[in-house]
């Protein structure tokens, strides 16, 4: 209110000054013509004057035609006496109107007052402006250590989320439902001796719904909910982050019971002792303050801390111990049933056609996270709007899957006839190997239409949701990856760069199979790769080995052997089924895209059904 009063005074002063300046300027612009009193007498005699306005010694003449004028008379005599001396008779004066005005005090003193006080007011205004700016800078310096946490309000119905808006993470919802219930009915738990959990850590891959779950807790709990990002604690000045942590927990304690949610906590919670700043590193000081606030000397608090991260491996062990983050809620990628539920949630505000089949879309999206599915629904809605459709149909949803997975269709990239033929045989090789090897995922779609960085693609869908993968599955996948390479080699007796991405994926998969999964018969059940985490940078930058040069040579030979066997397997199948390979490739050249049913008709074989809702 005090600041508003100051601003109002400044506005009034400025308006007053502007109006005064405007009045002076306008008065000067409209100043009448100065004439002699003798000319006034002459114009009266010529009957050109209709009115005289006398104010002190100033006479304003209003003519019958033409602009106004003004003249000066003697102070001691009246206007009639003055005009009489210039030969104007009383009869002539009776034909015009004479008005006498008393001199105005404001008009006399205003120019003088403005000339004195206006510069003073301008100087004072400038001085106040710079003083106010200096005070604001000082206040900002004092508030530098204040936290910028946002408080969720249950009245924000538009952005409010509840547990009903979250699907596919039933166990996580049950864990968090207990936290909400504890805050609403604490006595129910305290009477039996239960202690309020100090912290809940949400762990999961990007897009799995960690922040959405936190929003659902905020919507369900009838308590203050503070939410802040981990990066907002960190500043270039040492001690600012710790000060903001103290301020955040002080606010939360004043409104207890309450919830504090720190998103992306790995920004400040990474393992200590590995940075370049030593003990005075700002991030470490901030983490130390969080540890103390959560479970330090003062333990009498009803504040629950929630945090989210997709890098639990880099967090400090002191942060994860009981008494700080008591509960670790794990969020996995959704299975087919969860994907169907998530699609229905994101479709609530969209106009759908009756032909939309969410089960079919869920079957085609294995490995999609909740964020991916939300993006899929949005892309489908955008596509339907661009086509001027009133409803979202199954066609838009199917096309959006390809766009989300591979990128937009590159219609401007036109392949030459030779390149189109090579791409067709390449993708036909992938598809035929996938249809011929037991254990390989069935082919759902084959296309030589460019999308994103891919010149063509063969889309496979698993027959069931899997958590465990066998050696035979990996070997089948290697053969499928090398199917395009083998097809080019067999048909054209030449190799192109089109198989480079397949070869890179096959090499990485084989190295994991040999060194990490223990699936090599020659090397046995031993892990030969140890990851060395560079916690300061938050990325894996090196791999430290604990084996001899001899073992290294064996690993290289084993990787080469597995890849060569997969290549020979793929080449043998394509040689045996050369006519079928030709048939698939020629059909692709004509149609460019083969859906599952068309592909089955071409090869004359019905593939097994796609994803079922169970884990291997």
Image: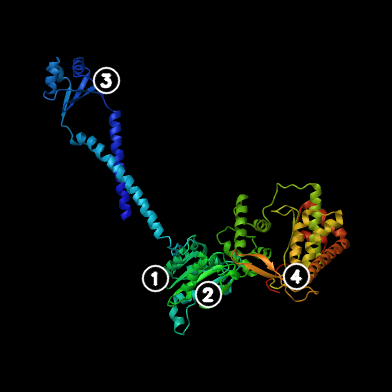
Label 3 to label 4, Cα distance in Å? 108 Å
Q: CA distance from mark 2 to mark 3?
A: 95 Å
Q: How crowded is the residue under tag 2: few (<14 C-alpha within 10 Å), some, or many (20+)?
A: many
Q: CA distance from mark 1 to mark 4?
A: 55 Å
Say whether marks 2 and 3 touch (CB < 8 Å): no
* Nearest-to-viewer mark from 3 and 4: 4
- Dot 3 and dot 4 residues touching (CB under 8 Å): no
Name which quarter of the figure residue 88 lies in: top left
Q: For marks 2 and 1, give the CA distance.
A: 21 Å
Of the numbered discs in the image, which one, if any, rests on residue 325? 2
Q: Quadrant of the C terminus?
A: bottom right
Q: Position of residue 364 (x, y in %)?
A: 69, 63
Which numbered mark, 2 or 3, is in the foreground of this view? Answer: 2
Q: Which residue is mark 4?
A: 513
Is residue 163 among the parts visible in the rendering? no
Residue 314 visible somewhere in the drawing: yes
Disc 3 or 1, which lies upstream in sequence? 3
Instruction: Please state which of residues 248 and 281 is positioned toward the viewer in this rendering.
Output: 281
- Residue denoted by label 1: 254
Give the CA distance from mark 3 to mark 1.
82 Å
3 and 1 marks in contact (CB < 8 Å):
no
- Residue at position x 47%, y 80% in the image: 195
* Figure check: 553 above or below 454: below
Looking at the rendered structure, the secondary structure element under dot 4 is helix
In the depicted view, which residue is nearer to us: 534 or 565? Answer: 534
Q: Position of residue 199 (x, y in %)?
A: 51, 74
Mark earlier in primary sequence (2, 4): 2
Q: Which residue is the site of mark 3?
A: 65
Q: Residues within 10 Å of mark 1 (few under 14, many from 20)?
A: few
């Amino acid at each position: 209110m005090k600041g508003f009063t100051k601003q109002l005074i400044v506005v009034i002063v400025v308006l007053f000054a502007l109006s005064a300046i405007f009045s002076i300027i306008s008065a000067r612009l409209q100043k009448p013509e100065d004439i002699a009193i003798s000319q006034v007498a002459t114009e009266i005699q010529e009957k050109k004057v209709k009115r005289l306005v006398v104010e002190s010694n100033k006479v304003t003449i209003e003519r019958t035609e033409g602009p106004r004028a003004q003249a000066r008379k003697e102070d001691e005599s009246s206007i009639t006496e003055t005009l009489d001396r210039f030969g104007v008779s009383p009869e002539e004066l009776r034909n015009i109107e004479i008005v006498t005005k008393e001199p105005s005090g404001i008009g006399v003193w205003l120019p003088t007052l403005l000339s004195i006080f206006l510069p003073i007011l301008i100087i004072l205004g400038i001085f106040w402006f710079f003083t106010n700016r200096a005070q604001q800078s000082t206040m900002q310096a004092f508030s530098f250590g204040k936290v910028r946490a946002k408080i969720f309000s249950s009245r924000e119905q538009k952005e409010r989320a509840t547990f009903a808006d979250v699907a596919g993470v039933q166990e996580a919802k049950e864990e968090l439902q207990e936290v909400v219930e504890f805050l609403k009915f604490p006595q129910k738990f305290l009477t039996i001796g239960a202690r309020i959990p100090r912290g809940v850590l949400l762990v999961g891959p990007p897009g799995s719904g960690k922040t959405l779950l936190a929003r659902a807790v905020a919507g369900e709990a009838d308590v203050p909910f503070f939410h802040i990002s981990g990066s907002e604690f960190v500043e270039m000045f040492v001690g600012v982050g710790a000060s903001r942590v103290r301020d955040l927990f002080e606010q939360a304690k004043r409104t207890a019971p309450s919830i504090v949610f720190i998103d992306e906590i790995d920004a400040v919670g990474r393992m200590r002792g590995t940075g370049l700043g030593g003990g005075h590193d700002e991030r470490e000081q901030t983490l130390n303050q969080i540890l103390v606030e959560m479970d330090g000397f003062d333990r009498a608090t009803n504040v629950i801390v929630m945090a989210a991260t997709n890098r639990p491996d880099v967090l400090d062990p002191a942060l994860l111990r009981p008494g700080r983050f008591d509960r670790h809620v794990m969020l996995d990628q959704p299975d087919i049933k969860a994907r169907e539920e998530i699609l229905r949630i994101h479709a609530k505000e969209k106009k759908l056609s009756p032909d939309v089949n969410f089960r079919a879309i869920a079957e085609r999206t294995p490995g999609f996270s909740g964020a991916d599915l939300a993006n899929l629904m949005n892309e489908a809605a955008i596509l339907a709007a661009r086509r001027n459709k009133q409803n979202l149909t199954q066609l838009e949803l199917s096309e959006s899957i390809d766009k989300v997975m591979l990128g937009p269709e590159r219609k401007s990239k036109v392949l030459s006839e030779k390149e189109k033929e090579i791409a067709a045989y390449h993708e036909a090789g992938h598809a035929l190997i996938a249809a011929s090897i037991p254990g390989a995922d069935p082919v759902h779609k084959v296309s030589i239409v460019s999308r994103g960085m891919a010149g063509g693609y063969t889309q496979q869908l698993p027959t069931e949701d899997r958590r465990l993968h066998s050696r035979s599955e990996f070997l089948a996948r290697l053969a499928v990856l090398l199917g395009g390479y083998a097809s080019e080699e067999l048909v054209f007796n030449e190799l192109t760069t089109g198989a480079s991405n397949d070869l890179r994926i096959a090499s990485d998969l084989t190295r994991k199979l040999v060194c990490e999964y223990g699936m090599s018969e020659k090397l046995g059940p031993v892990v030969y790769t140890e990851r060395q985490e560079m916690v300061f940078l938050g990325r894996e930058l090196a791999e430290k080995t604990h084996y001899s040069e001899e073992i290294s040579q064996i690993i290289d030979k084993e990787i080469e052997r597995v890849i060569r066997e997969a290549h020979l397997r793929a080449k043998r199948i394509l040689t045996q089924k050369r006519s079928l390979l030709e048939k698939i490739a020629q059909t692709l050249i004509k149609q460019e895209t083969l859906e599952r049913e068309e592909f089955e008709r071409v090869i004359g074989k019905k593939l097994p059904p796609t994803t079922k809702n169970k884990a291997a």
